[in-house]
Image: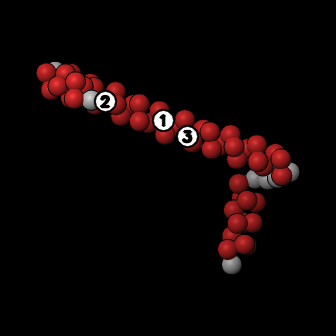
Amino acid sequence: MQVVVEKFRRLSPEKQDEVLDYLKFLELREKTRAWLELDAWAINLAKEKGFYHLTDEEIARIVSDFRI
């Protein structure tokens, strides 16, 4: 890890900005991948449980009814 820090410090400020942008991109890609996996899991669960046909509004109403 120290090697990475040393190499980063030797870069110009412009190149450091590019590296930071790339790191932000990688972080976002990881978060996006996690959300896509969660979405796929939720869709499969809905299909398995037989409520895949429900609309967002119906789901919101059901959730609201159970919170009361």
Residue nearer the viewer, 11 or 64: 11
- Residue 11 lies left or right of residue 62; in this view the side is left
Residue ID at (70%, 47%) = 42
SS at mark 3 in the image? helix
Residue positioned most to the bottom: 68
| Horizontal arrangement in the rendering, residue 11 relative to residue 4 (left or right) | left
Callout 2 touching callout 1 (CB < 8 Å):
no
Identify the amino acid type marked 1.
Glu
Q: Residue at x 65, y 43 (%)?
A: 39
**Residue located beneath label 3 in the image:** 34
Verify CB contact (< 8 Å) between mark 1 and mark 3.
Answer: yes
In the rendered image, which quarter contains the C terminus? bottom right
Q: Is residue 17 left or right of residue 47?
A: left
Q: CA distance from mark 2 to mark 1?
A: 14 Å
Residue 46 lies, in percent from the top left, at 78, 49
- Mark 3 residue type: Ala
Checking the image for residue 30, the label placed there is 1
